Image: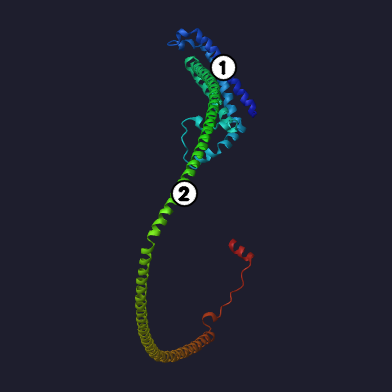
Amino acid sequence: MTYPQSKRISEVEASWGRASDLSSFERDSKSQDLETRDGNTKNVHRLPFFKASLFATTLEDIMAQLYVLFEINTELRVLQMRTEMIENLARKYGVKQKTVINELDEIDPKKLGSLEYKLKKLQSDRYLVLKVLQDTYMDLSLKCQYNALYENVNRIWDRQCHLKNLIEVESNNRILRRELNRQLRQQRNHVKSITYDTNVDIELLKSNLEDSELNSEIRSRYVLSWQGARTEQHIQMIHDKEFKPNHAIEYFKMKADQEQRVHTEIELLNNIRINEVLVEVEHWMGKYDKDIERLDLKVQLKKNDYEAVCDKRVELEEMLVEHEESINSWKKFKDEREADRQYRVNMFNAATTVQAWWRGLLVRQQLGPYKIVKKKGPAPKPEEKSGKKKK
């Protein structure tokens, strides 16, 4: 019989509720017997033998029901197998698994409502209940005590208290974070306002700087124009004073340049003539070399043709000799083959004659397979055979 998952979860929650009630009862007893906590706790959580036996018997039934619930709940086992399919395949084929130091590292906060986590939580809760019951049963059976149950309930209660403390700390941290965010927004707005004022001051300084740059550029332009005018005036005065000497110097320079130009032109003509003669000499020398090379090539080609004709004649002579030898060998082979054929024909005819003579002899003499077989008398009747046996 399979229970739906919601019912199973409700049963687990109910068991946790019973555990919490039991923990409240134990807390009351703990407050009453606080003075005996250090050395006498074993005597405090002790029961009589009869009550311990009844309690252990009840636990036996509960553990049996839990074992039955674990074994017959095939739907949960199938869902668990589907969720753990990848891990099972990895273990089957020997894939190395990473070691999990903390179980919380493998939990994704965004998938807390997934079926895998729900199944793992349900399975862990069931195993926890079963382990507590087993420890309590062993403690009751051997020592008539329920210290294991007491310790587990205290551990669960401490964990719930720790979780409550964590929730309170988280709420305080959330309030502190909200306050820090508010202060951060205020600080950011303050920084923005200061940045805006600073940018306005920077723009004013830039405008003043541009005005000063324009004024300085206008002044420098006026000064440069005045300096240029003065420079042109001085240059014109120097040019007027040095015009005649410069004119005489330019005349003599022009004469010297003309003489130098004539000299270079004459030298250039001579060089051109010498180069033309050298070009003609190189042309005829190159033509002579080309003609000699062409004649050498023709001679070499004729020589190669003669050698090729000689080689071909030698090959033809060798081919004729080989052909004559092959014809002679073929004639000899035909003669030998004909003699061999004639010998086989003669031997076959002789064998046929001897075989025919031998068979005729066997027939005439009635020998071998042609021997006459004597006929046997008629077989006796069955009645006669029986009469002979009686006699």
Position of residue 3 measured from the top left corner of the image (x, y, whole percent): 64, 28
**Dot label at residue 20:** 1
Alpha carbon distance from label 2 to label 1: 103 Å
Label 2 packing within 10 angstroms: few (<14), some (14-19), many (20+): few
Q: 167 left or right of 4?
A: left
* Amino acid at pointer 1: Ser
Tell me which numbered mark, 2 or 1, is placed earlier along the sequence: 1
Classify 85 as above or below 380.
Answer: above
Residue closer to the observer: 224 or 142: 224
Position of residue 162 measured from the top left corner of the image (x, y, whole percent): 51, 20
Q: How is the image coloured?
A: rainbow
* Amino acid at pointer 2: Ser
Classify 260 as above or below 92.
Answer: below
Residue placed under numbered mark 2 in the picture: 225
Label 1 packing within 10 angstroms: few (<14), some (14-19), many (20+): some
Write the residue at 64% across / 25% down.
Answer: 7
Residue closer to the observer: 17 or 70: 17
Write the residue at 58% across / 25% down.
Answer: 66
